[in-house]
Image: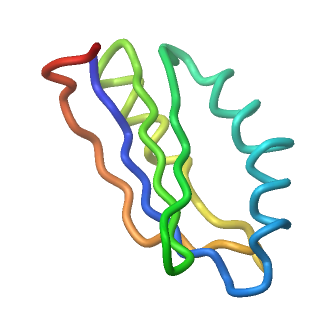
Amino acid sequence: MYAVAVAVKVEPGREAEARGMLESTIVPQVKQNPGFVSGTWMQAPEGMGYSIVVFDTKEHAEASSKTVEAQPDAPVSIMNVAVYEVVAQA
């Protein structure tokens, strides 16, 4: 299995908008990607957010990673996107 790790910066004052967009748009879209296994989205201090989305193959993870982008005027900025091999999972 392989995971796509994404770090985002949420624009101050737009946290509720970012959360709504995550719940109504991002999560449903990601779940439809080929090879999707599981996903976790986390909110961190100082307006940062992180996600780990696991896929069944490296090819599916890499394909999904290439679709990560912030829309114009989105409440978040993409800081980093990386694909990693999953070596253990509980």
Residue at the spot x=78%, y=85% of the render? 13
- Residue 37 horizontal side relative to residue 32, left or right: left
In this view, the residue farthest toward the left is 87
Residue at the spot x=60%, y=24% of the render? 33
Quadrant position of the N terminus in the picture: top left
Which residue occupies the foreground of this view, 55 or 7?
Answer: 7
- Residue 39 horizontal side relative to residue 85, left or right: right
Q: Quadrant of residue 20?
A: bottom right
Quadrant position of the C terminus in the picture: top left
Give residue 4's position: percent from left, percent from top: 38, 40
Give residue 55's position: percent from left, percent from top: 41, 20
Give residue 58's position: percent from left, percent from top: 28, 24
- Residue 84 horizontal side relative to residue 34, left or right: left
- Residue 47 horizontal side relative to residue 62, left or right: right
Residue 11 position (above or below residue 20): below
Which residue occupies the foreground of this view, 19 or 32?
Answer: 19
Q: How many marks?
A: 0
Q: Quadrant of residue 24?
A: top right
Residue at the spot x=37%, y=65% of the render? 80
Residue 18 position (above or below residue 39): below
In this view, the residue farthest toward the front is 45
Which residue occupies the foreground of this view, 71 or 11?
Answer: 11
Give residue 82's position: percent from left, percent from top: 30, 51
Which residue occupies the foreground of this view, 69 or 90?
Answer: 90
Colour mode of the rendering: rainbow
Residue 23 position (above or below residue 57): below
Residue at the spot x=46%, y=47% of the render? 66
Residue 81 position (above or below residue 53): below
